[in-house]
Amino acid sequence: MKLSVNIKELRLSTSTGDRELLHDVNFSLEENNIYSILGKNGCGKSTLIRSFSGLNDRKFCLIAGLILADNIDIITASVEELTTLRKDKIKYVFQDAANSFDPLRKLDYYFKRFKIDQSKSEELLKYFLLPSLKELGEMYPYELSGGMAQRLCFVIALLMEPELLILDEPTSGIDPAIANLFLLKIKEFAAGGKKTILLVTQDINFAKSLGGFIAHISEGTLSPFIGSAEYFSSDNVLFKKGDL
Amino acid sequence: MTLLLKAENISFKTDKNKDILKDISFELSQGNILGIAGESGSGKTTLGKILAGLLVPTSGQIILNKPLDWQKTRVSPVQILFQNNGEILNPFRRIDSVVREGVKLRFGKNADSYKRAEEIFDSLNFDKSLRKRKGFELSGGEQQRGALARLLAVEPEILILDEPFSAQDPDSQLTFLELFKKINREKGTTMICISHNLKILQELCSYVLIMYKGAVVESGDCKTLFGSPVHPYTKFLFKAENYKLTYDEFIAMRT
């Protein structure tokens, strides 16, 4: 990864300052790796990863500390700097993928807008059982099911070949069989050279099968990232979740 | 054990003559919990609706051994908990009034509906402060509990649960699982649980049907079936759940 990401003493709290969501988050991301963050509903997982792309609304969330991406501090970065980072280096796939699309534009907009290689697009669309570019391009977002929208967002993000790909709950609301396709592609993407993936999930099996590094959030603290095998070993007292 | 429900050669076609369900037969004894597993589009919900009497099968029949006291009432002894409860609970009515209405429908106007409603809410650990709220004032999980309270108000013989765990985080899934077990244990309610989550079905059910493209491809008691699945599709579902599928295996099952 040409992009270097370092997080130093990051603190997130509600805008009124009366509730600290996360305190003292410190870590850095290395290339060719997958980083998964586990945690329950409402523990601040999404808020944390949104802050890496400067997506938190400052009206509701106060951020302190340093998030350095290529030595640009995302917390204090200008709109132009953030736009460049988001355009070229960091891609974020939202949990409610269907809402990522402009409802008034046909889907070919996204393929034309970013000048994506057509054969590569076709290949990935086919892989994820989506209609061909010609057919899909003529569709509006409302014609996609939730699962299709999620797959399409992921496909577009992959096609942009970002250096850092951030995924918010990639398997929520999709069939387990399709979730397997996500797993295979994420692994392939991370192994494909100088790429990093950071994701949050509640799906313990998914995180386990991805390998890479795992951490979890509990009571406002992010545990250190440790290797998957070590994290899920019975010796790890940090991991006490009931694996249903 | 008393035989409560028998499905005989149930088939269902759409208006355009597309097969949704093909020749499904099974039996359900009183007090048991039956699981129906399969992916989206395999026909699970359609089967649930037919069992609840909401859809009429194109061919085949459902035989229900209705106990005597049900014959005096117009309430169905088979109740179904849908996936999208937010759309089903009346958003402008208080949940306690909805539940009391259910009690009266089933047990007559003279029934002590206040007492019964409170007992049902208590058994579901439905917080006292929530009971006076209207449908739209409840969160997704609370709405689901509210809808469940309304179903239990008529003390159904069979309770059908359609993907009851799909919109919940793992902790709430466990809580709900325990709740269903408790209802089954304490009330003796027979249940049918539709879910794609094999691990949960394994925890909850005694018998399970595996559905693929509208047909039952494998069935059996949970322990045997989950212990050594035979049909390739059942094996596929297990692999998928454990993230062990290869792309080729995935495609082979889709075509």
Image (cartoon, helix red, strand yellow):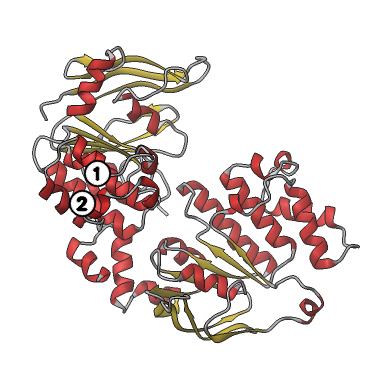
Which residue is labeled 2 in the image?
A133
SS type, badge 2: helix
Mark 1 Cα within 10 Å, few/some/many (few <14, many 20+)? some
Q: Amino acid at mark 2?
A: Leu
Residues tagged 1 and 2 counted as in contact (Cβ below 8 A): yes
Left or right of residue A6, residue B43 in this image:
right
On screen, residue A213 above or below B210: above
Quarter of the picture holding the C terminus of chain B: bottom left
* Residue drawn at point x = 60 percent, y = 57 percent: B179
Q: Position of residue B214 (x, y in %)?
A: 41, 76
Dividing the picture into quadrants, the one containing residue A103 is top left
Q: Position of residue B2 (x, y in %)?
A: 65, 84
Quarter of the picture holding the N terminus of chain B: bottom right
Q: Position of residue B84 (x, y in %)?
A: 55, 54
Q: CA distance from mark 1 to mark 2?
A: 8 Å
Which residue is labeled 1 in the image?
A108
On screen, residue B202 above or below B142: below
Q: Is residue A228 visible?
A: no
| Chain letter of the residue carrying label 2 | A
| Chain letter of the residue carrying label 1 | A
The outermost residue toward the left is A193
The outermost residue toward the right is B110
SS type, badge 1: helix
Are the residues flagged by discs 1 and 2 from a single subunit?
A: yes
Q: Amino acid at mark 1?
A: Asp
Dividing the picture into quadrants, the one containing residue A200 is top left
* A244 or B48: nearer the viewer: B48
* Residue drawn at point x = 38 percent, y = 72 percent: B226
* Residue drawn at point x = 32 percent, y = 66 percent: B238
* A21 or A166: nearer the viewer: A166
On screen, residue A73 above or below A116: above
